[in-house]
Image (cartoon, rainbow, N blue to C red):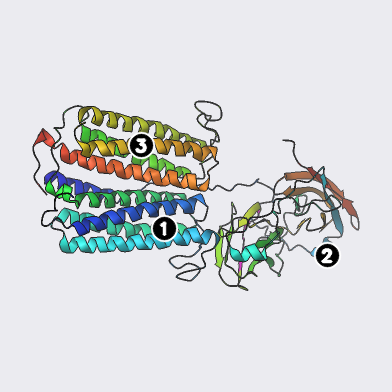
Amino acid sequence: MNSQRALGLALALTLAAAGCGGGGDEFSLPEGAGSGGAAPTGPAYDPATATASIAGSILFEGDAPEMPPIQMSADPYCLDAGAGTREEAVMVTDDAKLRNTMVFIRSGHDTGLFYAPPAEPVVLDQEGCRYIPHVFTMMMNQDITFRNSDNTLHNIHAFPMVNMQINVGQAIQGMETTDSFTIAEGPFAIRCDVHRWMNSFTAVFDHPFHTTSGDTGDYAINVPPGAYEVVAWHERYGEMTGSVTVAAGETAEMSFTYSEPAE
Amino acid sequence: MGPAAPAGDNVGLHRFAVFTALATTFLIFAGGLVTSTGSGLAVPDWPLSYGMFFPPMVGGVFYEHGHRMVAAFVGLLTCVLAVWAALREDRRWVRWLSIGALLAVIFQAILGGITVRYLLPTPVSVSHAMLAQTFYCAVVALALFTSPDWKRGLPVAGDRAGAPSLPFLCAMTTGAVYLQLLLGALMRHTGSGLAIPDFPLAFGRLVPAFETPNVAIHFAHRVGALLVTGMIVWTSVRILSGYRRHARLVRPAILIAGLLTVQLTLGAFTVWSEKAVMITTFHVANGAVILAASVFLTIRSFAMLPPGGARRGTA
């Protein structure tokens, strides 16, 4: 009887036992693509001083890998609304330019100025069970509006390394949620945990000198005259850098060429 | 047809406890599916799901909300079990154990909510995984303690001679399995499952370079598998050689050895398949069953090998 009681007591006590462990996340991305750091607090930047321009193309050399179609059978709505959708990691235009590449200034801009975030929010839409745009850039403290244009539920799960993670659910078509990131940091992913194929990439900057190659594979950034380090970042092929000096009223050409790495 | 259960056996309570244990096995499998499919945050709110009791079961929601539904069912079963025991169970310590199980499942639900609301912090997620195992052991123990076989009094199989004694050896094996499950949970919730991508070697070597914590965690789980294998083999050999006539000890020992073989195979295929969802999830669930079987054997061994070999009376 005593041993039974002891056994019961021991088992009851072990109910309180639980493990512990360290932090970590399975998702990792190249560091340092953004300029990083906190906001400068100096005099305000005047956009009218951006009288020069850096422009170019993101070129792709060689045969572009064929993106596989996305298997959307996990959600009947997506199966219909997203029919024919392919993965978007590598999208090359007919004239051999790489879409969805971030381009931004890493150094050379006046870090003593205060760069106010745009008043207009960035909009990340969910349509056809994919994120639109697939790659975008934004400024810290700029609003980002998540919109669900689909007639199914989504969650928007951002995986920044420095900023707080965001995970919001949108169950209803037309639903919008606005948030922001308060610290500049390099590219990170935004994913939907409901539909695992949905992903988007963004970076948060403390200055306005950033853009993407969008749908055309070309880009242009207006800057004050000066010497700059320019960075291109692609979700699969990573980062390329270049230096350029541009004078007032001029456009400096700076193109980057990516290719599929050898096996 | 076996002998009729003696009066006061309360076979209904026992059967209900067995059913709860089986449901808990499925719950652990469902929980494993959530992690294996990366659906832990597919439902970002808690306790509701997208503000609803029953959202559309699409994509990752199927796994996460499905897990919540099964958990709610097991919680309900545990509640009924505790009430039933409170009303019909004579032994106070069994009643307390059932209350402990109920508190555990409640706390487990809260831990699940916290891990969702705080975006899967590793300590909370690992604690959630380990409390699940602990709760499972408690329910299996309840099923054993409420069985007519237990209440009638198990036959004495010997004394606690030898060093270590069989009950102590079984307890050590159970402890080793529990620690191994802790390492497994740590591996899953730190994303270390493929930190070492080859098997049976590790980066082509017996011992890899510990360049990241993930590699160390993964390798610790492999070393743990070796230790657990050794403990289970030791326990099984001890029982098969010294207690061959006692089916109550032999059967669970053989079962555990068989489950271990399955578990090692599943572990290898988890790496080789790059964490295929079903293989990984069965690896998790089978690990839990090994622990439960080991707890079962440990309790029986303590009961059948009392101190000094004195015959134990019925509870």
Residue type, numbered disc 1: Gly
Please tell me whether residue A180 belongs to the stretch shown in magenta: yes
Please provide percent x and percent y for residue A123: 68, 67
Image disc number at residue A48: 2
The residue lying toward the viewer, choosing from B239 and A128, is: B239
Say yes or no: labels 1 and 2 on the same chain: no
Name the amino acid, label 2.
Ala
Disc 3 crowd, CA 10 A, few/some/many (<14, 14-19, 20+): few
State which chain disc 2 sits on: A
Nearer the camera: disc 1 or disc 3: 3
Residue assigned mark 1 = B112
Q: In which chain is the residue bearing label 1? A: B
Find the distance from the CA under tag 1 to the CA under tag 2: 53 Å
Amino acid at pointer 3: Gly
Residue A213 lies, in percent from the top left, at 79, 55
* Circles 1 and 3 on the same chain: yes
Q: Which residue is mark 3?
A: B258
Secondary structure beneath label 3? helix
Instruction: For residue B100, say whether it is visible.
Output: no
Of circles 3 and 2, the one toward us is: 3
Residue B128 percent location from the top left of the image: 39, 52
Give the vertical position of B223 relative to A254 (above or below). Answer: above
Decide: is B170 above or below A160: above
